[in-house]
Image: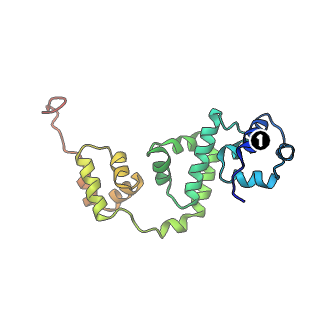
Amino acid sequence: MPDKLPTRARTPLLARLRTGEAVQAVAEDLGVPVREVFRAARTDTELALALAGVDPDGAEAVGVVGRADYLRLLALGASPSLASQILFDGAGQANTWRSEQPAFGTACDAVAAATVQRAERRPSRFTPERRRQFLECLRAGMATTKAAAEVGITTATVYQRRRRDPSFAACQRPVAIPHWWPVGGR
């Protein structure tokens, strides 16, 4: 049986779960085995949220899903910066959550610690070709975060390389502009 509920059962199930009814009673009324409801929730985010007591259409759901996706990516072996790159285009949303919600930070640390061995074995994706492309993006005026995303690396990778490789760090130093240069340049 597929892990999806038919619309004729899913729609009323979601509506009744939003009002706080018990899943067992609703599933029984709709003639759907409760096991199928739980199986469907594996891939149906709205249903999983409703079962957890969160309104899938509410503003809170966006944050809940974002945090869950971030933790899932960490569990799959992504670094925190790669997870941010995937979910938020490199924006620091996860850092905001970590600082505002200490329990979320603790969860992130625990998940990352559980996957650290796998992450240590991962070969570097910052190949010489990507390095060349990254530096070209910087020379074209892109910010570090945007240039890193453009070539498929994380900003953490860039900063680690800067610390380990002085010649790489020197390639990225901005050209000094004299203090007397007119604003906007020529």
Q: Residue at x 27, y 49 (%)?
A: 137
Q: Is residue 20 above or below residue 32?
A: above
Left or right: 56 with respect to 23? Answer: left
Q: Residue at x 81, y 50 (%)?
A: 32
Report the front residue among 101 and 132: 132
Q: Position of residue 149 (x, y in %)?
A: 38, 50
Q: Where on the picture, by quarter, is residue 166? A: bottom left
The colour scheme used here is rainbow
Residue farthest along the top direction in this orientation: 183
Left or right: 63 with respect to 88? Answer: right
Q: Position of residue 29 (x, y in %)?
A: 86, 43
Q: Quadrant of the N terminus?
A: bottom right
Q: Is residue 97 above or below residue 106?
A: above
Left or right: 11 with respect to 76? Answer: right
Q: Position of residue 71 (x, y in %)?
A: 59, 52
Report the front residue among 179 and 8: 8
How many tags in the picture? 1
Classed neighbour count for the residue bearing mark 1: other residues with Cα under 10 Å, few (<14), some (14–19), many (≥20) = many
Q: Residue at x 62, y 47 (%)?
A: 104
Q: Position of residue 9 (x, y in %)?
A: 76, 44
| Amino acid at the residue labelled 1 | Leu
Q: Quadrant of the C terminus?
A: top left
Q: Element type at marker 1?
A: helix
Find disc 1 in the rendering and name its residue. 13
